[in-house]
Every structure is written in C-alpha cells, then in structure tokens.
Amino acid sequence: MLNIVIFGPPGSGKGTQSEKIIERYGLVHISTGEILRKEIKEDSDLGKIAKSFIDKGELVPDQTIIEILEKKLESLNNVKGVIFDGFPRTVDQAVALKKMLQRHGEDVNVMLNLEVDRQELIARLLKRGQISGRSDDNLETIEKRIRVYEERTFPVIDFYKKEGTYTPIRGVGEINDIFKRISDAIDAVKV
Ligand code: AP5
Ligand code: MG
C-alpha cells in the first residue's frame, strides 16, 4: 500500500492537492474535516460534539478522532493506499496512526508538508469563506485555527522527521506546479 499524510496549516491546500493525488494514484481519501462536516450536516451525536469545537476553531478531542479513523480504516479492504488529510493533527494522533497501520503491516510512506505563509493562508480562507458556507471560514476563527495549528499540530513535524518520512513542499504558486512537486516526491518513495 501507499500511505500518504498530507499536512499543513489551514488553507495550505491539503484538500485541493488530495483530489489530484487520488486521481493520479488511485488512493482512498480520508479527510477528518470532511467526515466531521458530514456528521454535522446529518445532525448526529458526533456532529453535535464536533460542531462545538469546529465553530471555535479548536481541535476535536483525540479520542473521538482516533475512533473515527479506526472505524474508517477497518472498513477498507483491497485498497491501493490511503491519503490522510487533516490527520494526524497532534503527536498522540500520529502515534495512534502508526499503531493502527502497524496492525495491518503498514506504515506511512511519506509525509508531505505544504509550506504556505500566514498572510497567504488568511487571504485564501477569507476568499473561500465568501462561498464555502464553512462556519470556521471567518477572520476570527481562521486566526484561531492558525494558532491552534502552531501550538498543537506543528510538533507533528518532528515526529515524522524522526520517522524519516518528512518531506517539505513549497505550497505557494500555481496548483499544478505544486502538484508536480508533490508527485515527484511521491514517485521517489513509491515501491
Ligand atoms: P479541516 O477540514 O482539516 O480544515 P483545515 O485544516 O483548517 O484546512 P482547510 O480544509 O481549511 O484547508 P486545506 O489545507 O484543505 O486547503 P484547501 O485545499 O481547502 O479541519 C476543520 C476542523 O475540523 C478543525 O479546525 C478541527 O476542529 C476539526 N478537525 C479536523 N480534523 C481533525 C483532527 N485530526 N483532530 C482534531 N480536530 C480535527 O484550500 C484552501 C483554499 O485555498 C481553497 O479555497 C482553495 O481553492 C484555495 N487554494 C488551494 N491551493 C491554492 C493555491 N495554490 N493558490 C491559491 N489558492 C489556493
Ligand atoms: Mg481541507
């Protein structure tokens, strides 16, 4: 299997690039943000819990997210690989993912870190906010999400540096140029 973590701050292009990656490499896309937004739309119990965190720009508790991931992974069979988008977001989530994959004799093959400066992130998300309907695409919540990223998610980079799979990708410029950098990185690890 080819297991990819696509990583980066809010608005760095994880979702945009994931779409292109799944198209080229035939992977299953697991976006925890999308899973949670679907639950919110359905007004499920999980959705109600998730909404209280997402609307404030905070992270949903690790245990909740890890359970979602476990269920999702168990439901897959015979897949070429998985792209994890928006997960892991804490070091505990990264450790949990490693254990989950290990049970299947798998591991993360490459961690792609999309590097985009703060001004650009805010500009992109404000622009998207005009049409997305996402409750967290407003200036106050965008700034909070970036702070939470810096405090709780940034340390995940060190985890993958130690794992030896960390790959920085310049995430600014044309979407197709960024995808070229990404596909070169994936092709370099592809077995
Ligand atoms: P999540 O849905 O993961 O959101 P996020 O990390 O804040 O990131 P975004 O989805 O906003 O951005 P993106 O990096 O996907 O960029 P995109 O491609 O859309 O999480 C939302 C919330 O859910 C969290 O705050 C948390 O509460 C909860 N959550 C989710 N996962 C969790 C977890 N594991 N643990 C705990 N809580 C969790 O691009 C952004 C915009 O820029 C788009 O409009 C796009 O068109 C545009 N764009 C993309 N590329 C370019 C480019 N090259 N140039 C110009 N514009 C571009
Ligand atoms: Mg996204």
Image (spheres, rainbow, N blue to C red):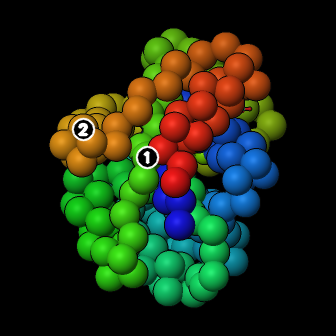
Residue located 76% across and 25% down the image? 176
Where residue 37 sits, quadrant-wise, is bottom right
Question: Foreground residue, 24 or 87?
Answer: 24
- In the rendered view, would you say 120 is above or below 98? above
- In the rendered view, would you say 186 is above or below 174? below
Q: Residues within 10 Å of mark 1 (few under 14, many from 20)?
A: many
Residue behind mark 2:
161
Label 2: state its secondary structure. helix
Residue located 53% across and 66% down the image? 1
Q: What amino acid is labelled 2 in the image?
A: Lys
Q: Residue 117: horizontal and vertical position, in percent?
A: 47, 15
Mark with earlier residue (1, 2): 1
Disc 2 beta carbon < 8 A from ligand 1? no
Q: Residue 153: horizontal and vertical position, in percent?
A: 31, 42
Question: Foreground residue, 34 or 140?
Answer: 34
Q: Is residue 71 something that shows in the picture?
A: yes
Q: What amino acid is labelled 1 in the image?
A: Val
Label 1: state its secondary structure. strand
Where residue 145 sits, quadrant-wise, is top left
Residue behind mark 1:
110
State left or right for residue 74 relative to residue 157: right
Q: Residue 49: horizontal and vertical position, in percent?
A: 45, 72
Q: Is residue 148 something that shows in the picture?
A: no
Residues under numbered marks 1 and 2 in contact, where contact means CB atoms less than 8 Å apart: no
Question: Foreground residue, 130 or 61?
Answer: 61
